[in-house]
């Protein structure tokens, strides 16, 4: 276990400096972001079209022209699939009848522990998009 010096505690992430101790005896400081994790959805309709969002993301430099999968942070006590369902409905106004877990990925394991749980959703029903 690494020693940790807290730097910042935010709404979504915590940042700390951790002292990494390697098996060969070397040690070094590493900036580490702790994140509660999230879920992302690839929503595919009967015509094999994938639904992506065009959203403004300040940290990414503005509007994401290539699109972004509906996704969001897992709330305390919430199952990843429930997060995916909630985010698809909130962000895209879509509900899905069928869900398949595609597994989980570490988004940036060099400095962050964020795990994203990926889901495929099909059997789509379109509601009015939420704002």
Image (spheres, grey):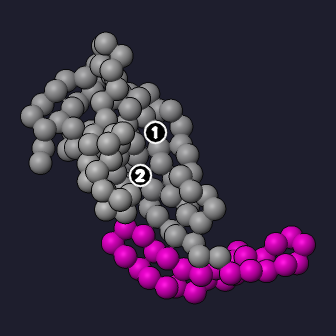
Q: Quadrant of the N terminus?
A: bottom right
Extreme-right residue of the structure? 24
Q: Please tell me whether residue 49 belongs to the stretch shown in magenta.
A: no
* Residue on which disc 2 sits: 38
Residue 7 is left or right of residue 122, and the answer is right
Give coordinates of residue 89: x percent, y percent. 21, 39
Q: Main secondary structure of the magenta part?
A: strand
Residue 28 is left or right of residue 56, and the answer is right
* Residue in the picture at 12% in, 31% down: 127
Residue 42, located in which quarter of the rendered image?
top left
* Residue in the picture at 37% in, 76% down: 10
* Residue in the picture at 61% in, 58% down: 109
Give coordinates of residue 66: x percent, y percent. 36, 39
Give coordinates of residue 129: x percent, y percent. 13, 38
Tell me which numbered mark, 1 or 2, is placed earlier along the sequence: 2
Q: Which mark is residue 108?
A: none
Residue 2 is left or right of residue 45, and the answer is right
**Mark 1 → mark 2, Cα distance in angstroms:** 9 Å
Q: What stretch is highlighted in magenta?
A: 1-29
* Residue on which disc 1 sits: 118
Q: Badge 2, how many Cα within 10 Å: few under 14, some, many 20+?
A: many
| Residue 69 in view in this figure | no
* Residue in the picture at 55% in, 64% down: 112
Vertical placement of residue 129 versus 17, above or below? above
Residue 124, located in which quarter of the rendered image?
top left
| Residue 88 in view in this figure | yes
């Amino acid at each position: 276990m690494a020693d940790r010096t807290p730097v910042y505690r935010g709404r979504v992430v915590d940042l700390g400096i951790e002292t990494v101790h390697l098996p060969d005896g070397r040690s070094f400081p590493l900036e580490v972001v702790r994140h509660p994790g999230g879920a992302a959805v690839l929503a595919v309709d009967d015509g094999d079209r994938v639904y992506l969002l065009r959203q403004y993301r300040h940290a990414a430099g503005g509007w994401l022209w290539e699109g972004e999968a509906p996704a969001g942070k897992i709330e305390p006590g919430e199952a990843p699939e429930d997060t995916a369902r909630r985010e698809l409905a909130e962000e895209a106004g879509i509900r899905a009848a069928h869900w398949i877990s595609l597994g989980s990925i570490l988004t940036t394991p060099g400095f962050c522990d964020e795990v994203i749980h990926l889901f495929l959703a099909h059997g789509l029903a379109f509601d009015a998009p939420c704002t």
